[in-house]
Image (cartoon, coloured by chain):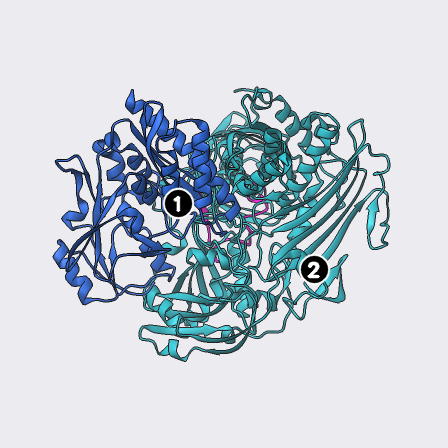
Amino acid sequence: MSDRPYEVIGTRPVRHDGADKVTGRAKFGADVRLPGMVYGYVLRSPHAHARIRRLDTTRAEQFPGVLAVVTAADLPESPDRPVDLVEGTLPLRYVRANVLARDKVLYKGHAVAAVAAVNRHVAEEAASLIEVDYEPLPAVLDVLGAMREDAPRVHEDLRMREFGETTERAGNIAEHFRFVLGEVEPSPTGEGLVPKGFADADVIVEREFRTAMVHQGYLEPQNATALWNQDGRVYVWTSTQGAFSAREAIAWVLDLPVSRVCVYPMEVGGAFGGKIRIYLEPVAALLSRKCGRPVQIVMPRRDVFEATGPTPGTVIRVKMGARKDGRISAAQVWMAYETGAFPSGQCAFGAMCILAPYDIPNLVIDGYDVVVNKPSTAPYRAPGATQAAFAAESVVDELAEKLGMDPIEFRLKNAAREGTRRADGPKHARIGCVEVLEAMRNHPHYRAPLEGQNRGRGVALGYWFNIGWYSACTISVNPDGTVNLVEGSVDLSGTRTSIAMQAAEVLGLRPDQVHPVVADTDSIGPTAVTGGSRTTYATGWAAYEAAHDVIRQMKQRAAMIWDVEPAAISFERGVFRTGERTMTFAELAARLEETGGPVIGRGAVNPASAGGSFAGAIADVEVDPGTGKVRLLRFTSLQDAGRAVHPTAVEGQMQGGSAQGIGWALFEEYAWTAEGAMANSSLLDYREPTALDVPPIETVIVEVPDPEHPFGVRGVGEANIVPPPAAIANAVYRAVGVRLRQLPLKASALVDALRAREN
Amino acid sequence: MKWFDYAAPGSLTEAFELLARHPGARPLAGGTDLLVQMRAGERQADLLVDVKRIPELNELGCDASGTLRLGAAVPCCVISESELVRRRWPALAEVAAMIGGVPIQSRASLGGNLCNAAPSADGPPVLMVLRAICRVAGPSGERRLPVEEFCIGPGKTVLAPGELLVGFEIPPPEPASGACYLRFTPRAEMDIAVAGAAAAVRVEGEAIGWARLALSAVAPTPLLVREAGEYLAGKPATEDAIRAAAEIARDAARPISDVRGTAEHRRRLVSVLAERALRVAVARAREAQA
């Protein structure tokens, strides 16, 4: 293809980690084996909320085969301060308290103590001998109940932040924020603000939605292997999305300088946002310090569900008005997210996304982060946005229906464009919202007839803003004309290859001539977490810079050989040239020793922002009205990738995000006992979709390049999970005429709704 | 999971000795329930007695009368792939292919499925409508009882300490008969029944000769609903009769609300699934008649 601007970008080479992954040779955290290594087990709270009156580890310590026991008393007590945890800022005391509970346990599964022993079974048995005297406290389990003034308090010391300021208000509301656009007025009660514009609306829809707490559902459980070396350095092998963010958090919790901690990021068996926080790492390190041996802890599945960070359950109220001409005139949103035992800030992310696809003149969004006695929530692929889109896109669908408009045409009429102001302040840069909607409208799926009873088609749109942040890369040139690319970004999804391809494009090499290495924190410059759909975008940019640095240095070497000025040398498609003289990259690479020694290029970037990504979904369903079962017949995912570096990897992201969104829509939820224990903490009863529940997912990559990025790349990891639940709910409505406003869309609720309609 | 010992006896006698000597012993067939429960701390055992090497528990074949002799430890994949079972007792082959996924089916057995005594077990309702008899043996000899008498509560069976379920005897299918099991799971497969219904029917011309209906996941044990069968016997095989029998089944169900479903949804599911299972069983019986 001669019209393609790039040689490498946009091709589909074999992944660099492919052979290791398919042969089982790739090393995951639980594969780590060190000389003298022993095994740890974490004792966890059986209560959702209780005070620890007494903790006695004597019998566990005396149990044969036990080498060390630790509790919160082994954690350092440095002064409290706010620390930046990637997805939000928390007081250090909260971060420590989640690693090992000190005075109170705040959720069932909260870590209380840990044992290291000669094997995992001995450690588990010894842990059962630890005596903990709990004084159970009333648990706060419901987000609306938790917001009441008289609700039991999760934290005595929590004070609500409101509009960016800390207030004196004690309770469970960690944060209240408000986004306002256009004209607003005080609400009739005087307590809040309402947007103007409902008065000239011809149609107003106001609905309340609920979504369940759900888990990222990665297959590989959390794990950590730590060695507290006799020289005072701490080495940690772990499954993490960010070696550097993990290093920082471990150092904070253990009160060490970051340079005393080295993190080896292992291959990651799924993360989706859930492997940014640290859990086991400091515990394994403390055990190692006590027993002088490396200690490995691997979470049982139950602990993964009960003690790592799922995503918040929510209550969201959306009111929208539209005129007969199809324009949305006003929107009001009230959203409350249960953040679990500690504040998480995810409601703000949801609020940034909920109305972002639309140009709405007047709007008010009130958001609340609310602590409850459940696991401390963590990011999950487009954190906070999927819940929000379920609510907003259901209301948008209903508005379109009431106006008698095609749901995609209605969205197009209100679509955000470059320059449209987002609710949270900034204006959209060049975005692909309209292009994604047009791709949906023009897709054969949207036009295909859907025949048969109880069948329906739904659509929805989703947005995720993506992030930039810092990344570092080095590229060293091998004498055979290949290069080694060392990067600090953990590879969750094939980013070794998508980053290597950006270097290869600059260097005029084939992707397989770039050998990518994900390095530990001693071996590469600081690189922010693999998250926020930033890795191919920002670390790819760093690789682009490093590759240009290599070319600059190589030109100097060629200049030396040819005795010309470096400026007189050009480089194109792998060939250095001055006048009639040429040298290939490989020929010059073989002459580095004689021209001054190794060439090492460096790239370091810190983009302040990144181009957001829009995704759309089209879903066809069939409903069994007898049982309430919803079967997906066809599913199409469409997403703006800016520029798809590796289209197969982009399609994989779209299919993966869609499959997870289907899980949110139809199956997944934390179920709770009245006492606040998770009632389904196994993969048997926490139902993720299987291959049989997910139809082949068709993908359409839309390319609206991000003008900021050298190749126009947009992150594609997240926006794709946002629209599926709303698209499926809208499809169910078109199939059987009832709208469910609670995720997951349960069979029993659907039959209830169908029967209620009959009566 | 705590440490435990493991033994794999080659004969019933040896197994009975081990069970008698170790009061904390438990028999292990496929282990697909037991090991999961032990990991979760729900069951303990000092010794697991693996019964998979005992010849009697691995039987699969017909005796002279055409009765199927099915060992308690025969893995589901062997049952579902058996030409004999597929031809003569297709509903049994179907349910063996429905429990868990392929790796589970290579270990799990219908005997283990029954001994685990989960109310939601898929195997027992099918065994009940096929009139299967359990062969239970212990140091003092063998006793026989119908499958519907085997479970006495969630996780509880009539097995006395030291006894083993050796296998099942399933009478030969009658002419013009058919059977079917349907269940509701939120997912397509790889799931536990929220409710299930098994039906077996014999047709005689336009009428139903006899019928049997059994349910899963809607009572403390898998449940044979005799009244539904009695109601249908001799009635014309009409939609109305089938619907009425399904209503009898619904009224017989005693479901609870739990994490897998509400009692109300389970009751509704029973009537839907019983009706559909009966309809399929009648259609299959008519096919056999033709």
How far across and how far down the image is residue A625, in percent? 54, 33
In the displayed structure, A663 sits above or below A647; it is: below
Residue depicted at 72% across the width and 38% down the height: A428
Give the image location of residue B196, x and y in percent: 41, 41
- The residues tagged by marks 2 and 1 sit, at their Cα atoms, a distance apart of 42 Å
* First to last magenta residue range: A514-537
Residue at 58% x, 28% y: name it: A456
Report which residue position mark 1 lands on.
B216
Q: Main secondary structure of the magenta part?
A: loop
Q: Colour of chain B?
A: blue
Residue B28 colored in magenta in the image:
no
Residue ID at (66%, 60%): A146
Q: Which residue is mark 2?
A: A147
What chain does badge 2 belong to? A
Position above or below: A602 against A33: above
Image coordinates for residue A759, horizontal then vertical, percent? 64, 36
Residue A401, visible in the rendered structure: yes
Q: What's the colour of chain A in the image?
A: cyan
Q: Amino acid at mark 1?
A: Ser
Q: Element at badge 2?
A: helix
Label 1 SS? strand
Q: Chain of mark 1?
A: B
Q: Nearer the viewer, residue B213 or A564?
A: B213
Horizontal side, residue B52 vs residue A739: left or right: left
B113 and B28: which is toward the camera: B113
Nearer the observer, disc 2 or disc 1? 1
Tell me the amino acid under the disc marked 2.
Met
